Amino acid sequence: MNFSSKLLENAVNEMSQLPGVGKRTALRLVLHLLKQPKEQTTYLAQALQNFRNEIKLCESCHNISDVDVCEICANPKRNEEIICVVEDIRDVMAIENTAQFKGLYHVLGGKISPIEGVGPHNLTIGSLVEKVKKGSIKEVILALSSTMEGDTTNFYIYTQLQDFDVNLSTIARGISVGGEIEYTDEVTLGRSIINRVPFENSLKNI
Amino acid sequence: MNFSSKLLENAVNEMSQLPGVGKRTALRLVLHLLKQPKEQTTYLAQALQNFRNEIKLCESCHNISDVDVCEICANPKRNEEIICVVEDIRDVMAIENTAQFKGLYHVLGGKISPIEGVGPHNLTIGSLVEKVKKGSIKEVILALSSTMEGDTTNFYIYTQLQDFDVNLSTIARGISVGGEIEYTDEVTLGRSIINRVPFENSLKNI
């Protein structure tokens, strides 16, 4: 692209470093800022910098947090005996939105993926094992995506925790609520038959 | 969305002010920055602020520019007798990329659109008329998109310039180079028949 302005070119180049943002999209976004009050750009720039420079990882669950120990870990009403293992903050937000889980989280920071060069030691699995070693945790729920990487990570955590006296579970796979049986893929449907639950359980709202 | 972090929430809210960026996309972009070196966020924030605070509009063509008079207007090799009227800098970039136009530009800053509350006085049409009034311009080429707003703007400019001794032209509409006749819509095909050109012209590379 032939920008006649260095200022514009810089802004577009930096913007197009973001994932899924090409040069054309970046140009559209940057030109949009020009039509808005200057304050909007100032607020955006400051919010991004403040976020990047001041955000911390919770010392206990490794979720991102404004303070040393995150809101969830610091909440005395949460059940400290159940730990839900997730990939990142988006999963924490999704599970929190269900309002069905009252335990604590453990954020891995990714999944084991040899292709992307992510091994067990790049994740917070060691810290999870340390937590379990202390003995007060009764259940670890694995809530990773149902992909090859997710299954690999699940299995690795299983090998690390199997010698401890802790229940290990994974979230249920099956047809979605409101889902029609005829349109469900066969792997999911097969799993939902194998992992069928007593009818009374389906009446419980946890 | 239930962010447990104020810093994250602010960053996502500001990011999602951009057009076409929803909360989920904003969250993905912001979390991406967290995995990159801090400098990347600093560069992005600075580039956006520098752009917004220091960018100018060229005094002559109203294109965005780092200096008072843009590179194109300041270039003595360009033909000052031909003015190409476009909507915004993206059109200037597109036409510059063809390397077929050696005149100057006049950037309107939009199109007349009563629905969006944009009238002739929100655009730089007055300044175009002033330029033409001086008498040294021989041709004004209208290069606006072929939409209702573009046609309205073209016609308004025509009414403003018809009393002056200046040739007014619009860029040609017709089937695209490489386009197949059977797949061309009938309005475009009809126009390309009405506005047929002598065969020798099609051999010229301008």
Image (cartoon, coloured by chain):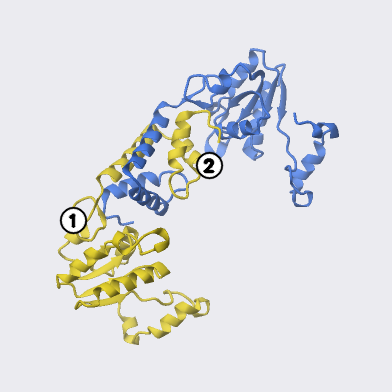
Chain colours: A blue, B yellow
Horizontal relation, residue A75 to residue A57: left or right: right
Chain of the residue where label 2 is placed in the rendered structure: B
Q: Which mark is residue B24?
A: 2
Residue B104, by quadrant, is bottom left
Residue A87 shows up from this direction: no
Give the crowd class for mark 1: few <14, some 14-19, many >=20 residues within 10 Å.
Answer: some
Give the crowd class for mark 2: few <14, some 14-19, many >=20 residues within 10 Å.
Answer: few
The extreme right residue here reads A199
Residue B14 image position (x, y, % from top left): 43, 39
Looking at this view, is B57 or A103 the one in front? B57
Residue B166 shows up from this direction: yes
Q: Quadrant of the C terminus of chain B?
A: bottom left
Residue B182 image position (x, y, % from top left): 52, 79
Residue at the image point whose x is 33% and y is 40% from the top? A39
Q: Quadrant of the N terminus of chain B?
A: top right
- CA distance for labels 1 and 2: 41 Å
Residue B31 image position (x, y, % from top left): 48, 36
**Secondary structure of residue under mark 2:** helix
* Mark 2 residue type: Arg
**Residue denoted by label 1:** B69
Looking at this view, is B204 or A83 the one in front? A83
Q: Earlier in the sequence, mark 1 or mark 2?
A: 2
**Secondary structure of residue under mark 1:** loop
Residue B96, by quadrant, is bottom left
Looking at this view, is B199 or A96 the one in front? A96
The answer as to whether the residues below labels 1 and 2 share one chain is: yes
Chain of the residue where label 1 is placed in the rendered structure: B
Looking at this view, is A203 or B171 the one in front? A203
Residue at the image point whose x is 81% and y is 31% from the top? A201
* Mark 1 residue type: Val
